Amino acid sequence: MFLSKGLPVLQMRLSHLLLTACLGGLLFQSTRWYRQRKTSLISDWEDPYYVGDLSPEEEYLERLIDIHGLTNLTQWQAWRITSSELSSDVEPMTDVHTNFQPHPDLLKVIDVHNPNASELRAVKRMEMPIQSRPTQITLPGSVFLFGVSTSYERIAAKDWAIFRAWKRWLTDGNGASNGAGLVLMLDHASSEQLDAMDAMLHEAGIDAYVTSTSEPTSKARRYYEMVRILKTYGATLAASGQPKHWFGIVEDTIFFPSLAYLRERLSSYNPNNRLYIGIPSERSDWQQDGKSITTYGGGAVIMSRHVVALIPKLSCLEMDIPAISYRSQKWDILLKNCVKKGADIDMHVIPAFYSPHDANYKPQLESHETGMRPLLLHDYQERHRIDVGMAHLVTDICGEACFMHQYLFHDNWAIINGVSISHHPDGLIHRRHHNHHKQHHAHNRRPGHRNSGHENENGDEQDTFGNTAKTPVSGQIVINEDKIQRRPLDWTGRKEVWNLVDSATVASGSVWQAYLKRGVRAAGPPQPGSSTPATEELDSLIVLIWEKKKSG
């Protein structure tokens, strides 16, 4: 049934010392407070010498015109961003104590067919902090083995979007593995496709074992077979000195921005226990289940080694079950139900964005506006409308924690790094952060009770879904209540959005981002015979040039 490619194989008196330590501590705290408050510095930037007829800004504009097309007259604003690293707890949002548009002359209207180079030039530099937590882990993915099943055609679609995403979260960003392993099962791929995929993955630095079904096969059956392969391949890796603690089976539309962060979130669990963990992302990854809601993992399930070894033995997943029973269910539903029925193992849940226990949930906010550091993105192309292989490039400059990090400016502008820039003319509401959850359940502890159902005055149980102060949850899942900081983006009135449309790394190592807003009404030259300026629809571009960070 399967075709496979081979396995990759410093003395001083005590009083003086104490006094010095105390003074040093006070100085450190004062400096740390100052640096956290002084979160931005705007300065002039001298244009570097460049070779060729065009400036870097002109070259980038030409790239944007070729790829996206722009109105003849287009608004243009460009900033150079220098990140200054702060070693402190990673906050979900940074208040930038300055204006994003401190000078009206920063905004230019350019003729894209005959642009003035001096108007394109990014002459202002802004310094913004990047908060990071130092780690001694050199290969953050070394404890993981992931399994994905998809088709060659899906991987190749949209300029190899899925493959480019894998290159971001399954490598160190420099063409070498981050320690994570991948088992890729293609559906009915040809030998040529199998060979090509195997070569591409290894050339990218992804440790992969590639296989294919010999005939078109339902996704449910493929993911069942995936667990069997993870068990066997995991044992082979362990025998060669590469033991894996966590085994993940995920959809091809799953993206982990940081395996180090995933590893941190899993650290409250003991991988030697029998654990079946789902990581639902948005509200749509939860389903109504009578008077309660439940989830099957949202396309991302993490298992301990003991569960991976157990699943192939469960009778509810025996190979002789007719194919129709597999085709009639989604793989995560089938797997969760079988693990519960056959082994009495409840699903533990680590919510990525939406949690039914979050009393501050606001359905009008998009996930990247909730002020949480993203644990994973599910169906990123449709739900978030981003190309993560491109959007995640900025982390090469500012680190993984800055992806989707929110920056709030005094003049009611906000940057969600790698996603969008927004202006809120009627005001942003600046609030302190709060915790995503209120309590923490120790791992492997079942809830003390089941939540009862709630109905509104009309008896409509559906209205309880998303009413997070009282949403009842199925007793078959145990929600991880880690205290995760969040600061939702909150505003009143109007909202203008520039979405990320392009990101590129240049020879100097800088990462250029382009955020575009289509069709902005702006004043143009007067019509013949009239002294009143005409209005026309102009595209609007904001370019951020992320330069190599300074040490903090």
Image (cartoon, grey):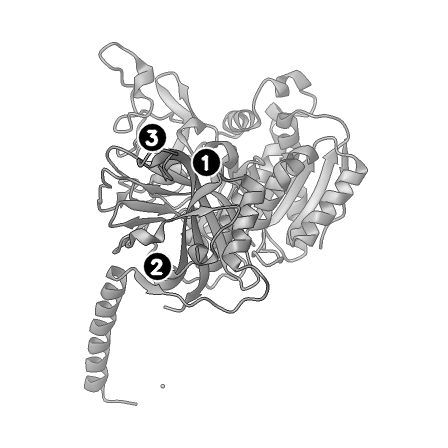
Does residue 169 appear in the picture of this structure? no
How far apart are labels 3 and 1 at the CA level? 21 Å
Q: Looking at the picture, which amino acid does disc 1 mark? A: His
Q: Tell me the residue that label 3 is attached to.
A: 356
Q: Nearer the viewer, residue 429 or 3?
A: 429
Q: Secondary structure at mark 2?
A: strand
Q: Earlier in the sequence, mark 1 or mark 2?
A: 2
Give the x, y percent position of residue 493. 25, 32
In the image, taking residue 309 as reference, residue 468 lies left or right, namely: left
Q: Tell me the residue that label 2 is attached to.
A: 128
Residue lying farthest top?
Answer: 458
Determine contact: label 3, label 1, CB under 8 Å: no
Give the x, y percent position of residue 479. 37, 35
- Closer to the camera: disc 2 or disc 3? 2
How far apart are labels 1 and 2 at the CA level? 25 Å
Q: Quadrant of the N terminus?
A: top right
Q: Is residue 259 above or below residue 224?
A: below
Q: Looking at the picture, which amino acid does disc 3 mark? A: Pro
How far apart are labels 2 and 3 at the CA level? 34 Å
Give the x, y percent position of residue 422. 35, 41
Q: Looking at the picture, which amino acid does disc 2 mark? A: Met
